[in-house]
Image: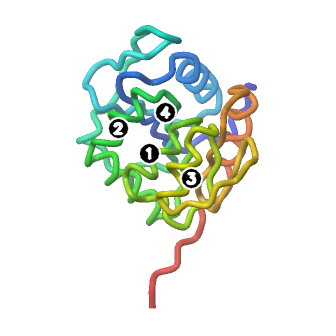
Amino acid sequence: MSDKSLTGKKIIVLVSNGVDENVMSMVQREMLKTGATIKTVGTESGLVNSWNNNQWGLYFPVDQQIGQTLGADFDAIIVPSGSRGIQKLSTNAHCERILASFITAGKPMVFMGGAVELLAKTSLATGLTVSGPEVSEAVMVAAGAKWEQEAECVCGQVMSGECADVSAFITNMIAFIAQPAVEVKAAA
């Protein structure tokens, strides 16, 4: 895939130590082909260490530290899977602040695999329809989300899914992000 469908868009890839190495590699590689400006934002400065099967894997450069990042400066956010990384992000107040700003602004948000649980751990899942790995269902339902059994789910500005076929998910993710933003209506 070498289209420039996202030219001019600024996109956050939100990560922490423990991000899934395979997923992160594919996201990075494919997103660079879209023409978008991609910023890897992490809980650590400099580098994040990925997780590969049962051991630490490759390091990925971090462009910007999460505490110095404003959601208002970006058009979309992608959170790759990796349970260790999601656990770290879920305890970071800046993560919740950034995600909340995307929800408020109606900007595209993509949660790959177990990353969907980040919405529950940051109290932002209520009223959303989501999907992901089967192990995430109970957590998401308990947090007030509606669970969809499909491999991928789009609910307004949120795309989530099991991500078993990472390449297909990324192709659909790019098309999702390329759509116009959801209009958010202010309360009367």
Which badge, 3 or 1, comes first in the chain's sequence? 3
Q: Looking at the rendering, which quadrant does residue 43 occupy?
A: top left
Residue under label 3:
108
Mark 4 is on which residue type?
A: Ile
Residue under label 1:
118
Q: What element carries label 1?
A: helix
Relative vertical location of residue 42 with respect to residue 137 in this rendering, above or below: above
> In this view of the protein, which residue sits in the foreground, 159 or 186?
159
Report crowding for label 4: few under 14, some 14 to 19, many 20 or more residues within 10 A (C-alpha). Answer: some
Can you tell which mark lies on residue 38? 4
Alpha-carbon span between mark 1 and mark 4: 21 Å
Residue under label 2:
89
Relative vertical location of residue 111 with respect to residue 157 in this rendering, above or below: above
Which badge, 1 or 4, comes first in the chain's sequence? 4
Alpha-carbon span between mark 2 and mark 3: 19 Å
Left or right of 145: which side holds 180? right
Front position among marks 1 and 4: 1
